[in-house]
Amino acid sequence: MKTCRGVSRHAATQVPGKAPETAPREPRIALHGWDWRGQVWHGPDELAYALSGSRAILRKLRPLASGWHGRLHARMPGQLPLDFCVSVHDLGDAGLAMIDLEGSPGGPLEITLVVPAHRRARVRKDFAFEFAAFLRFLEGSESSGSELAVHDYIHRLLSETDAATTLVFSIETCFVEREAQILIAEQVERLAIGMVAWMTEKDASHAARA
């Protein structure tokens, strides 16, 4: 697993003529985070389903069928701003986002997995295994050996938690300093909310056309 300098680690209005920016009912969203340094999970932290900080992300995602790659800008008072490179993908049963800094060696700094409540029933049987294998592939020869812990935790929560809960797993992949850690956590929350809204709107649109 790579070690990075400078970066370790969260009532829509209907406008006439436009699609609503939230689902009809606010989901319960539970965020679980993997701490790379401690090799432990923390959480869950409950996220409020509010689009105030995620509207720009949703606008970018809304016209796209399966994914987006672009930049998110973040700033902390008294610190230089950071531009994060972000990739978002709809996997069919979940959403995947990767956050990185341009020029950062190795894989992404943070990987976020979003499993919306309304898609829990369609999650593939080997979902946790496939995600752990993907994580191992990204880490390459510098793997920390955390894949089993990540697999077991995700598999257990998908099996044991209330199916009405949207699950968000945020996987830290290297050591980052406190200031950047805070900014990454903010981007994870913004992305998670935006992705939930995006996937909910897409699925509702597909259902309406069926």
Image (cartoon, rainbow, N blue to C red):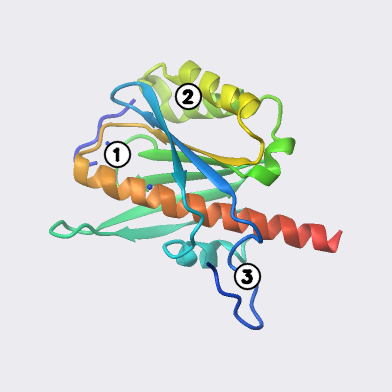
The type of residue carrying mark 2 is: Arg
- Residue at disc 2, secondary structure: helix
Q: Measured along the vertical axis of the image, is residue 96 above or below residue 127?
A: below
- Judged from this view, the residue extending furthest toward the bottom is 16
> Mark 1: which amino acid?
Arg
Of callouts 1 and 3, the N-terminal one: 1
Mark 1 / mark 2, whichever is N-terminal:
1
Label 3 environment density (alpha carbons within 10 Å; few <14, some 14–19, many ≥20): some
Residue 92 in sight here: no
For label 1, count other residues whose C-alpha is less than 10 Å away and answer few (under 14), some (14-19) or many (20+). Answer: many
Residue to which mark 3 is pinned: 20
Instruction: From the image, tell me which residue sits under label 2.
Output: 136
Q: Secondary structure at mark 1?
A: loop
The spot of residue 150 in percent (x, y) is 48, 23
Q: Which residue is mark 1?
A: 9
Who's the residue at 63% across and 70% down the image? Answer: 20
Q: Residues within 10 Å of mark 2 (few under 14, many from 20)?
A: some
Question: Looking at the image, how many numbered discs can be counted on the residues?
Answer: 3
